[in-house]
Image (tube, rainbow, N blue to C red):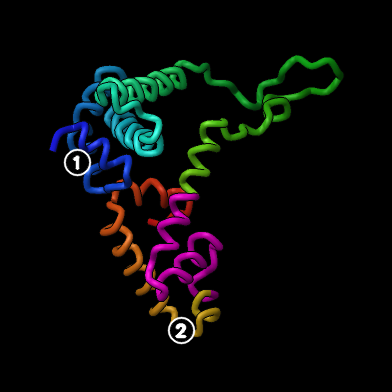
Amino acid sequence: MNEAQLVMLSRQGDQLAFNKLVELYKDKIYNMAHRILRSKTECEDVVQETFLKVYLNLNRFDENKRFSPWIFHIGKNICLDLLRRRKAPALQLDQPVAAQSDQNLSLHDVIPNKAPTPEGEVIEREFTDKMAEMIDKLPDKYKNIVHQRYVLEMSMEDISKANNIPVNTVKSRIHRAKDFMKKKWGKTLLFYSMQLFSFF
């Protein structure tokens, strides 16, 4: 199966095809990132974030163009973002700042809370939609429990009481639900989606 076919199948939701694309490009993306960043940890982050963005934006990829320039462009931009963050000057949050008043303000007082970027909000919404889709396709005996645990953030004990089953049964069903989801959607997508819900 050639690369174009893998991309086409991945766009249609074929997880095995997407996993093959991951295998095909993960080392190449890592090596590119290492040439730019020279940091093993950051390179691993780049690889993960690159494939996350690729998966979430496959429907925007022009199949008449080559896939490799597109994925390397995504990876390179992530690397450049990391470099820009490195170069940002460190600020002492307690140092006084000039203000048009008699107040002795620090950066704690004048820097607003960092709101999510528009792109971050889009990715989070897509995460949430994908997670909801996965939960909805679980067998009935797992669906409600997983929703209660990772969406409603109920404790194991509260889930036990709500469903009138022992805590150990709750734990067992959640474990089996994870296995079911890994087999159905693959570890890569599941890992990214579960970050919203501290699944692991």
* Residue found at x 44% / y 69%: 143
The location of residue 10, given as percent across then percent down, is: 28, 41
Amino acid at pointer 2: Ile
Give the x, y percent position of residue 127: 46, 46
**Residue at coordinates 22% horizontally, 48% vertically from top-left?**
16
Give the label on residue 165, or none: 2
Where in the figure is residue 152, as x and y percent of width and height? 56, 63
Up/down of 155 relative to 129, above or below: below
Callout 1: helix, strand or loop? Answer: helix
Residue 38 seen in render? no
Q: Which residue is drawn at 26% across and 35% down?
A: 7
Q: What residue type is labelled 1?
A: Lys
Tell me if residue 70 can be seen: yes
Instruction: Magenta stretch: give its range.
Output: 129-158
Query: What residue is shown with label 1?
Result: 20
Disc 2 on helix, strand or loop? loop
Is residue 88 positioned above or below 22 on the image? above
Which of the image's four quarters has the N terminus?
top left
**Residue 83 in the figure: left or right of residue 5:** right
Disc 1 and disc 2: Cα gap in Å? 40 Å
